[in-house]
Amino acid sequence: MIVEIETILAGIREALPNSGISFRKNPGPSGQHSLLVDGSNLVEVCQFLQDTLDFDLLSNVTGVDWPEPAKADAVAVPEGEVTPAAEGFLEVLYHLYSTNRRVGPLVLRARTADRAGNAKIPSVVSVFRSAEFQEREIFDLYGVIFTGHPDLRRILMWDEFVDFPMRKDYVAPDDYEYEPTPHDAVLEKAKTHYPSSETQDGKIQDTRKEPVL
Amino acid sequence: MISDSSMLYSTPALETGDDEDQLLRVSLGPQHPSTHGVFRMNVVLDGETVVSLKPVFGYLHRNHEKIAENATYLSSMPYTDRLDYICPLSNNWAYAHAVEKLAGIEVPERAEYMRVILAELTRLINHTAFAGFILGDMGAWGSALMYAFREREKILDLFEDLTGARMMANFMRFGGCRNDLPAGWAMKCGKLVDDYGPFLDEMEKFLVGNEILLARTQDVGQLPKDILINGGITGPMLRAAGVNYDIRKVEPYGIYERFDFRIPLGEIGDCYDRIMIRFLEMRESLKILRQALDQLPEGDYIHPKAKIRNFKPPVGEAYGRIEGPKGELGFHLISDGTTNPYRYRVRPPSFINLTLLEDMCLGLDLADVVIILGSIDIVLGEVDR
């Protein structure tokens, strides 16, 4: 049932010598260790796992935001001395299974260079179709750009939305929905949201008709 | 943030060539009885034939995963009920299973038996309701669903006796269940299991020989096995195409290896196979239920040292999955050693099973789309999260 991750690692290193792949230990009791793959080789590694080692089911794709790189290395402990990343990054995890050999999960992780302009990872949709919607979801909620994805656009949030709500530093808006007669907690929030809209009798006016800038 | 706004694509235009005037664009849903909730599909039709189908998600999105990151581990348990609200107890189990992997918690034997009983009852609910819904999609509006819901309500009564709620159970805990079975519950459950077989006989009799059902479902929506696996399709959808992959057998969680049951497999993988596979699965669930009720041991319903307050799993991550009624239901949790999960990810079977919806529907009639969507068996609480 449990994958023999050392054997797989050796197999990948032999077949793809420049894959830049490394073992990451899981310190928890689950025993699900992972392989950190360099983004530029991710598609080749997935193709190799599918063709040679029969990992045909990409079950789950998870996005994670790591503003503090040290935390990421605490969850996925590197072997030996590794210089930690200089700045925060986004990470994508892949859980692979083999339906014939009935083993899994094989956990792959790929990291972006940073959380801003270079938040890019190659898409694995060309190897595993099951990543299509899941990568779109990670793009939508985290802002990872999957290069080569056939149809990368927002999936759960609406198209006009600008931020990425699952990031750790996401700030929720002051008011989610306009309320014509705010009261209680919403009234307090509305006062900060529309500071100049308060009239002398303390009521909030409908400022949506003439927005206060 | 992304500065280049061209990265944010909108829905791509369909390349239609000279046929533009001939095509009809239909927005199917979100308010439509056959979309099983607020699901929408942008369909392009050439006459009656589907040329393009783009699903539109998010009408029920509430960012469940973010809410769970801002709550303790246990406070997310009632929220998992709302994912797939037809089968809340399976969701409870999947989440408890993942947390138990993450923290290395053991579950007492009686609690394991209770979990199996509840999960299999949930499977009965889901597949029975499915039969009612899909016949509704085919135009048998009302009566089939009434028969299905009559039986479902009997199981929900059992759930209410046990958990206090028909659907929003919030019953599993890390290391067991919330409370013990009330007196006489197992006997009532046994009676229900005995009565369920005749109901299935009756329902199947209506289905198997029904000419309209055969005409509408046979050779509709099938895809080859390898494409289904590649598309991440799991559960009855995959087994209907003949792939022997059931997590209860492949990776026996809980105590499933103790029971004698078989995995029904389809041959073709069309909508008819998908309906029949669910009926066969219900028969197997009844077998498991009988064995579990016979073997149900005395003992603790929760691990005596299970921590309820100030529960902090060690640093690490875990992916736990179970065979939900709709497919592989998994939870991926990352702990940084605090009371709240650092990352909480749901692997929703309904959502991922929709990946190949367009492939199944292309070239068929619009009326078939409704059947295919029904045969995937989605619940929007789980799709949109």
Image (spheres, helix red, strand yellow):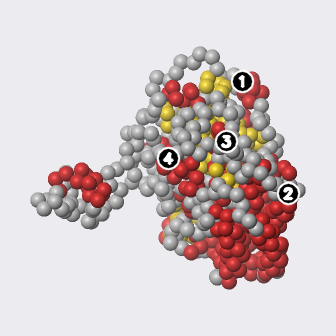
Residue type at numbered disc 1: Arg
Picture residue at 19% right of the left edge, 51% below the top:
A195
Q: Is residue B80 visible?
A: yes
Picture residue at 54% right of the left edge, 50% below the top:
B75
Q: Which residue is mark 2?
A: B295
* Disc number lying in front (1 or 4): 4
Q: CA distance from mark 4 to mark 2?
A: 37 Å
Compared to B135, does B87 lie above or below?
Answer: above
Q: Tell me residue B304's x, y (percent).
A: 69, 44
Q: CA distance from mark 3 to mark 4?
A: 22 Å
Compared to B38, does B101 lie above or below?
Answer: above
Q: Tell me residue A120's x, y (percent).
A: 50, 36
Picture residue at 79% right of the left edge, 68% below the top:
B187
Q: Which mark is residue B71?
A: 4
Judging from the image, what secondary structure is the residue with disc 1 in?
helix
Q: How many marks?
A: 4
Judging from the image, what secondary structure is the residue with disc 4 in?
loop
Q: Which residue is mark 3?
A: B305
Residue type at numbered disc 4: Ala
Q: Chain of mark 4?
A: B
> Is B236 in front, or is B253?
B253
Q: CA distance from mark 2 to mark 1?
A: 49 Å
Q: Tell me the crowding category of disc 3: few under 14, some 14 to 19, or many 20 or more residues within 10 angstroms, Cα based.
A: few
Q: Tell me the crowding category of disc 1: few under 14, some 14 to 19, or many 20 or more residues within 10 angstroms, Cα based.
A: some
Point out the residue furthest to the left here.
A200
Q: In which quarter of the view is residue B163 placed?
A: bottom right
Mark 2 and mark 1 in contact? Answer it, CB < 8 Å: no
Q: Which mark is residue B33?
A: none
> Is A91 in front, or is B45?
A91
Q: Which residue is mark 1?
A: A13
Q: In which quarter of the view is residue B55 placed?
A: bottom right
Pointers 2 and 1 within a single chain: no
